[in-house]
């Protein structure tokens, strides 16, 4: 099976300008820092007070090494940055300033874009041992969030119907690129494989509902790629959906509830609920995961009468 990889890393949240590197010498900063004899660290943004000042030559050299970059990938982080490092020379004259971004990248006026650090942890640890611990704490918190995001994405990918597994990367990319699901042609291409492999509509709907139950399982605020099963369910017949609900196990029923509560169904919700048998409606209500969702569905069902 395909695996998701990193989905929307928040180490440098909102990298606004992406693409190919637009020039610059990755080693240029290191050559400038060869003349550094001290550094002052202050918060961003603005002209904030100095947090620490370091003049020890061994420590300054260690920071210089920690700021070595791997490449200039062609992006600019959308945030101000964590801290700014103001380097000065032996005569106390300002040498240059570098902004640290999340232990992932740095910004320096000598480059047209941000640079990716070769080992971002080194700069964060350098700061932490001198009492500026927040950037390292935030980095580790972001790592934990990313690990959880990846775990959920793996779980969602595991539910993808077999003929659509080759599209896993495309599906996941919708959360970091388009943010709006698949395009019409992409849906048509993928659905053709579904129809070929699962010609029985009830069987097909059950598999799609099981897929929709995966991932976070939330009814709102979930990653954009998790709405993709709904794009295929929208193309299925109301009566077939009702028959599938009758046969669904707990997992698939949870996906059916999530589908009924999704924004995509708003224009056809009444038809979907009307097609359900009394037993199917009770099943849907029993498997709603919270009281608010259950009451919302109850009101819509009552409104059919």
Image (spheres, rainbow, N blue to C red):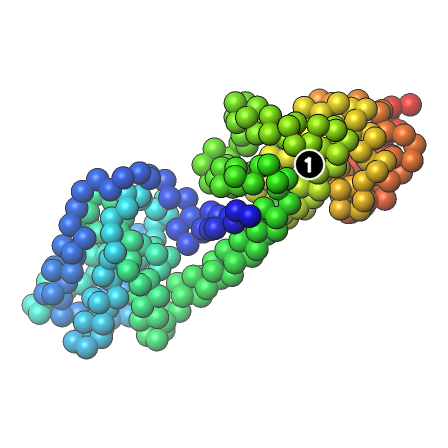
Q: Secondary structure at mark 1?
A: helix
Residue position for label 1: 208
| Closer-to-camera residue (214/301) | 214
| Closer-to-camera residue (67/129) | 67
Q: Is residue 98 above or below residue 54?
A: above
Which residue occupies the extreme left position in the image? Answer: 91
On the question of residue 97 being in view, the answer is yes
Q: Residue at x 26, y 66 (%)?
A: 66
Q: Residue at x 35, y 70 (%)?
A: 125
Where residue 160 appears, as percent x and y from the top left, is: 62, 42
Q: Is residue 284 left or right of residue 207?
A: right
| Closer-to-camera residue (196/270) | 196
Q: Residue at x 41, y 44 (%)?
A: 14
Q: Is residue 125 left or right of residue 290?
A: left
Q: Residues within 10 Å of mark 1 (few under 14, many from 20)?
A: many
Q: Residue at x 74, y 28 (%)?
A: 201
Where residue 287 appears, as percent x and y from the top left, is: 81, 44
Where residue 278 appears, as percent x and y from the top left, is: 92, 32
Q: Is residue 63 left or right of residue 103?
A: left
């Amino acid at each position: 099976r395909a695996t998701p990889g990193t989905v929307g890393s928040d180490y440098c949240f909102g990298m606004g300008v992406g693409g190919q590197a637009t020039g610059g010498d990755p080693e240029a900063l290191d050559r400038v820092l060869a003349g550094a004899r001290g550094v002052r660290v202050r918060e961003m943004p603005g002209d904030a007070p100095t947090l620490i000042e370091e003049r020890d030559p061994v420590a300054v050299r260690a920071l210089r090494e920690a700021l070595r970059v791997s490449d200039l990938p062609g992006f600019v982080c959308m945030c101000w940055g964590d801290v700014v490092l103001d380097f000065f020379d032996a005569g106390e004259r300002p040498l240059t300033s570098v902004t640290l971004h999340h232990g992932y990248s740095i910004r320096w006026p000598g480059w047209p874009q941000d640079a990716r650090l070769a080992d971002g942890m080194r700069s964060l640890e350098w700061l932490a041992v001198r009492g500026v611990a927040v950037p390292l704490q935030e980095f580790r918190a972001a790592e934990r969030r990313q690990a959880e995001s990846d775990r959920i994405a793996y779980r969602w990918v595991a539910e993808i119907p077999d003929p659509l597994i080759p599209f896993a990367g495309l599906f996941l990319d919708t959360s970091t690129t388009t943010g709006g699901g698949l395009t019409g042609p992409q849906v048509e291409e993928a659905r053709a494989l579904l129809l070929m492999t699962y010609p029985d509509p009830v069987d097909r709907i059950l598999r799609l509902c099981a897929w929709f139950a995966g991932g976070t399982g939330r009814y709102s605020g979930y990653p954009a790629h998790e709405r993709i099963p709904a794009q295929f369910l929208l193309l299925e017949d109301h009566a077939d959906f009702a028959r599938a609900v009758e046969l669904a196990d707990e997992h698939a029923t949870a996906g059916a509830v999530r589908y009924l509560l999704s924004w995509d169904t708003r224009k056809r919700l009444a038809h979907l609920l009307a097609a359900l048998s009394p037993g199917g409606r009770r099943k849907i209500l029993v498997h709603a995961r919270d009281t608010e969702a259950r009451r919302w569905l109850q009101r819509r069902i009552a409104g059919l009468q």
